[in-house]
Amino acid sequence: MSGKPPLREVLDTIIELLFVRFRMARIEFIAQKERMVRLGVLALSAVALFFMAFISLLFGLSEVLSPAARVWVFFGLAVALSLGMLWACLAMMKNLAGQRRFLEQTLKDVQEDVAYLRGQRDMSDWSMKD
């Protein structure tokens, strides 16, 4: 013991633990914001480059293909690109759901810490997570 009353030591531990958890949450918020900004810039760049390349491809195909082949090629491209767009939307939703779960887990850990410090849980209730 360091000479402090036990209540004071418990309060110091509670405050220190909560500050550590809140710092972890802050770091996660900052990292998530940076990932979202980077993702937005990359997505805008990819969309702009895609449209430029696609327009060039359509002009080239219009000159090279026969009228009957144009119909099949252009409708085929429309179907393929629609499927690609659907896949991209599903991938973005999965990515965002994973980021939400990560933040929710940190907040759940804070609640577990508070419950432990209040005496509502003991060390045998803690799950071993890595």
Image (cartoon, grey):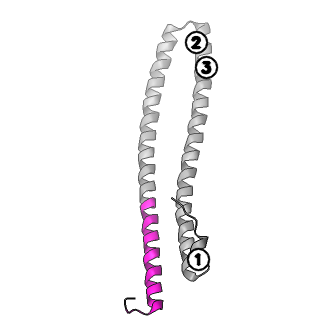
Image-quadrant location for residue 42: top left
Is residue 55 found inside the magenta-colored segment of the image? no
Q: Where is residue 106 in the image (x, y as percent from the top left)?
A: 52, 64
Q: Which element is circle 3 on? A: helix
Q: Position of residue 22 (x, y in %)?
A: 45, 70
Task: Tell whether 55 sits left or right of 81.
Answer: left
Crowd band around label 3 with a 10 angstrom C-alpha radius: few (<14), some (14–19), many (20+): few
Disc number for residue 122: 1
Q: Which element is circle 2 on? A: helix
Q: Rounded to the nearest whole Å, what is the CA distance between mark 2 and mark 3?
A: 10 Å
User: Is 60 or 30 nearer to us in this picture?
Assistant: 30
User: Is 31 or 17 nearer to us in this picture?
Assistant: 17
Q: Mark 2 points at which residue?
A: 70
Q: Nearer the viewer, mark 2 or mark 1?
A: 1
Report the label total.
Answer: 3
Q: Name the residue under label 3.
A: 76
